[in-house]
Image: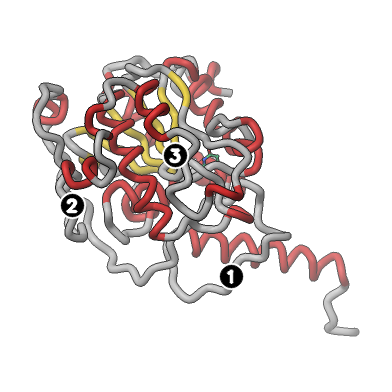
Amino acid sequence: MSARTNPPDRELILASLRDYVEQLREEGLEGLPAAEPSVAPRESPRVHVVIETPQAAPAAPSRAAVNDRQAQPPRIASAPDAAPRSAPDELFYRYPGLEKTADLAALREFIGDCTRCKLAPMRTNLVFGAGNPSAELMFVGEAPGADEDARGEPFVGRAGQLLTDIIERGMGMARSEVYICNVIKCRPPENRNPEPDEVAACEPFLFRQIDLVRPRVIVGLGTFAVQALLKVKTPISKLRGNWQEFRRIRMMPTFHPAYLLRNPADKRLVWADIQEVMRELGRPLPSRGARR
Ligand code: URA
């Protein structure tokens, strides 16, 4: 009998291998071959491929300390492997006047028809963010994909639909009740990882956005968003489910919805993270039936 694999089997094996490599990449593994744009999902999370040092998650700060929303000088998260960070003022003053933007509309106006990084000529629309400007809950993703670039709104493609389901069916909240944005406001070509200069150019806007919305809880979606917020290189598989702190706001890292589209078995982990978030917000969990 021939030991040769017939073509349909080969395709299945190849597809499984690609998924596996994608998963390793999502977990921050180094030295993987570059993803082929033709097989990468449209909304594939962009991932820093880094040399990572596994770290224990820091102890969660007390609820009282974190919920203290008084106007304290903002402070960046306290993850143990954090790289040296700029003081917030330095981030703001990177673009003089940014710290004076009084609300999201003023911030959007400040950003304008941005040409501060090399993504500008490639975008159709800058994707600023959407939702309730005084939301208790904020989701931070990575960067817009093709659908978001076309519509100028975050999370409107397939991964966005899943995020909407998580919010509406899983949490029993309206999507319009929360605030959703990305680290990077313009789509990187072929959905490649944002590059450090692009993150550096855009993150002051995210930080200002967070300071203006001042949510009680941030959910960081996927490796890239969480690493950008915490300035750590720990993979999402190690961070997820463990409370972090970002500028005195509680932050729950979890898997990116695009990752869940490829790994539906991990939805149960995200559900556990979401339950933590609901508990923190003091909101009731919808009944199981409502989540189906
Ligand atoms: N993935 C993201 O991280 N953000 C979006 O807006 C869409 C897909």
The answer to whether 4 appears left or right of 22 in the picture is right
The answer to whether 101 appears left or right of 175 in the picture is left
Q: Residue at x 28, y 68 (%)?
A: 53
User: Between disc 2 and disc 1, whose residue precedes?
Assistant: 1
Whole-Å distance between the Cαs marked 3 and 2?
Answer: 20 Å
Tell me the residue that label 3 is attached to: 182
* Label 1: element kind: loop
Location of the C terminus (image quadrant): top right
Residue 220: where, in percent of width, then height? 37, 40
**Viewer-nearest of discs 2 and 1:** 2
Residue 12: where, in percent of width, then height? 76, 63
Tell me the residue that label 1 is attached to: 34
Residue type at mark 2 is: Ser
User: Between disc 3 and disc 2, whose residue precedes?
Assistant: 2
Res 16 → quadrant: bottom right
How packed mark 2 is, by other alpha carbons closer than 10 Å (few <14, some 14-19, many 20 or more), is few
Q: Residue at x 57, y 66 (%)?
A: 21
* Label 3: element kind: strand
Identify the disc placed on residue 86.
2
127 relative to 230, above or below? above
